[in-house]
Amino acid sequence: MTDEIRKILTDHGRLPVDAGTLPADADLYQAGMTSHASVNVMLALEDHFDVEFPDRMLTRSVFESISSIEAALTELCGEAALP
Amino acid sequence: MAVRVGIDLVSVDAVRESIRNHGDRYLARIYTARELDDCRTAAGVDPELLGARFAAKEATLKVLRPGDDAIPWLAIEVRRDPQGWVELRLDGRAAALAAESGMTGMALSVTHEGGFASAVVVAELSSSGEPTEPMTRT
């Protein structure tokens, strides 16, 4: 999942640094991701993983690092897999 | 009088790219129906006008200082007066946070030029710093 998140960050995050080599806990906003770019990242993640980020997850902390995005996706994908 | 000020700058190209990549999902997730109506031209929704609205929402968040509270973009609406100026309308958690912060009024100004859109929001705080009634219209 981490590699897929990195690819989406590369394609949609408009980062001035290489998302492929960023540490998983690096702050994406400090790395240059704008709030508008985070919207594109969120929509691309939803497309790719077939999930929808609910309103309660529309917080800065959910999108602030690769590891926080992965944690949110793991939760959402887990919910989606429930009967 | 105590005030808070928020400012934001958005690349119009980034908005154009979002429309191209995500279409209606992007529009419906970020902008209210009224905002989309205000931004609609004969050529479709205008990315410059949308960018100004996105900047206004982000400038409002800087004024509200939500920390890690979830504030949906649709809870902050930019309304265009027929005379041309713009106002903010807050709903839900955004309105509650404004009230909890003791905000008694908010003013918004937006502009776009040279591929960028920008917005400034000024919020007036009650002199006592006490919470106010929920503010749904400024």
Image (tube, coloured by chain):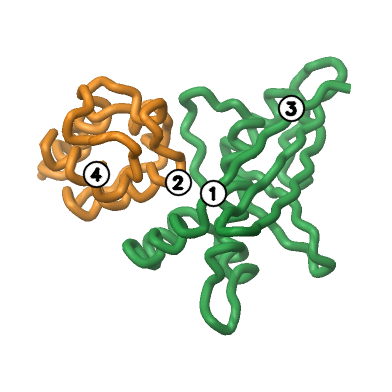
Chain colours: A orange, B green
Given this view, does label 2 or label 3 mark the residue nearer the observer?
A: 2
Q: Are marks 4 and 2 on the same chain?
A: yes
**Residue holding disc 1:** B10
Q: Are marks 2 and 3 on the same chain?
A: no
Point 24% across, 35% down: residue: A18
Query: Is label 1 in a helix, a strand or a loop?
Result: strand
Mark number, residue B96 = none
Mark 1 vs mark 3, CA separation in Å: 20 Å
Query: Is label 3 in a helix, a strand or a loop?
Result: strand
Residue A22 percent across, percent down from the top left: 22, 27
Which chain does the numbered disc 1 sit on? B
- Tell which circle, 1 or 3, labels the residue nearer the N-terminal end: 3
- Within 10 Å of disc 1 (Cα), the crowding (few <14, some 14-19, many 20+) is many
Which chain does the numbered disc 4 sit on? A
In the image, what residue type sits under mark 4?
A: Thr
Q: Are marks 2 and 1 on the same chain?
A: no
Mark number, residue B4 = 3
Mark 4 vs mark 2, CA separation in Å: 15 Å
Q: Are marks 2 and 3 in contact (CB under 8 Å)?
A: no
Q: Quadrant of the C terminus of chain B?
A: top right
Q: Are marks 1 and 3 on the same chain?
A: yes
Mark 2 vs mark 3, CA separation in Å: 22 Å
Mark number, residue A36 = 2
Which of the two residues, A22 or B61, is positioned nearer the viewer here?
A22
In the image, what residue type sits under mark 2?
A: His
Which of the two residues, B12 or B71, is positioned nearer the viewer here?
B12
Q: Is residue A71 left or right of residue A27?
A: left
Residue B29 percent across, percent down from the top left: 43, 55
**Residue holding disc 4:** A10
Q: Quadrant of the N terminus of chain B?
A: top right
Mark 2 vs mark 1, CA separation in Å: 7 Å
